[in-house]
Image (spheres, grey):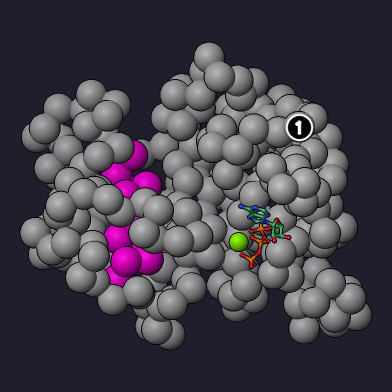
Amino acid sequence: MADAVIEIRGLEFNYPDGRNALRGVDLAVHAGERVALLGANGAGKSTLLLQLVGILKPKAGSIHVCGLELSRRNVREVRRKLGLVFQIPDDQLFCTTLYDDVAFGPRNLGVPEKEVDSRVAKALRDVGLPGFEDRMAFHLSPGEKKRASIATVLSMDAECLALDEPTSMLDPRARREIGELLKSLPQTQLIVTHDLELARNVCTRAVIMDAGRVVADNGVAELLDDRELLEKHGLA
Ligand SMILES: Nc1ncnc2c1ncn2[C@@H]1O[C@H](COP(=O)(O)OP(=O)(O)OP(=O)(O)O)[C@@H](O)[C@H]1O
Ligand SMILES: [Mg+2]
């Protein structure tokens, strides 16, 4: 479709040990959508997100981001368009200060330091960590790390966001605040989550993965109200 921001076709992936993690995933996310990607532990959600920015390479199938087919040649351009929040914050935070972590993406894109400065301040404010610029991620609580890893992606100002469990480890108020923040952002979003309340409040559409395949795709309310469907796929 013309307005697909993320288009995944026939995606298959095996881990080096032979584990068949993706078995033919088809999924399109359109401009302005916020899509919840649900599924039990081990369903393949994180594996799918890692493919979107070329960290893992598919065995078969294709990925388009903003009309660009992902390949080794244009992986940098794709990463400029799509910001990924990793499931594990330690994979995202590796600098000496939080300032440098959040500044890393925009600096890499050649954004002038003055603008980097204001982007860092805004991103940290947006995730509820104002004044944390000089802190070191290593010494943060798990919930603070999660917020910081979201800030590293917000500062990139990408066209679309893929977030792996953005509210895991957050307290109830922070969960609500991150939900409100995601709702307020203009970007197209693909949100992997076990937080069904977040999915209901933030997303318009929801997709379920099971054993490396997309097995359901519907309006978020219709899907979450289908108790039988949720139970069948380990979500209730
Ligand atoms: N590095 C790896 N090597 C081998 N197998 C892996 C590796 N990482 C993940 N897997 C396997 O791939 C499958 C999909 O894992 P993945 O992490 O994508 O699941 P997930 O849906 O994100 O689960 P969760 O909800 O627990 O985060 C699982 O069976 C998992 O055991
Ligand atoms: Mg995962």
State the residue in front, 18 or 95: 18
Quarter of the view holding residue 125: bottom left
**Label 1 secondary element:** loop
The x, y position of residue 166, in whole percent, is 47, 64
Q: Residue at x 21, y 42 (%)?
A: 103
Query: Residue 180, relative to residue 28: is it above or below?
Result: below
Q: Which residues are magenta?
A: 144-156
Residue drawn at x 45%, y 61% as measured from the top left: 88
Please identify the residue farthest to the front as the structure is shown: 17
Residue 129 lies in what quarter of the image? bottom left
Q: Residue at x 47, y 71 (%)?
A: 167
Asked if residue 121 lies left or right of residue 77, the reply is: left
Q: Position of residue 41 (x, y in %)?
A: 69, 69
Q: Is mark 1 within 8 Å of ligand 1?
A: no
The residue where tag 1 is placed is 59
Task: Say few, some or many: other residues with alpha carbon within 10 Å of mark 1 (under 14 / 14 to 19 / 20 or more).
Answer: some
The C terminus lies in quadrant: bottom right
Does 148 appear in magenta? yes
> Is 1 left or right of 96, judged from the image as shown?
right
Q: Quadrant of ligand 2?
A: bottom right
Q: Residue at x 11, y 32 (%)?
A: 113
Pick the residue in front: 235 or 142.
142
Q: In the depicted view, which residue is nearer to us: 164 or 229?
A: 164
Asked if residue 174 is positioned above or below residue 218 in the image, the reply reads below
Quadrant of the frame with the N terminus: top right
Q: x and y percent of residue 67 in the render?
A: 63, 22
Q: Is residue 4 visible?
A: no
Inspect the image, locate mark 1, and give the three-letter code of the amino acid beneath it.
Lys
Is 226 located above or below residue 14 in the figure?
below
Give the percent coordinates (x, y) of residue 143: 35, 74
Residue 224 can be seen in this image: yes
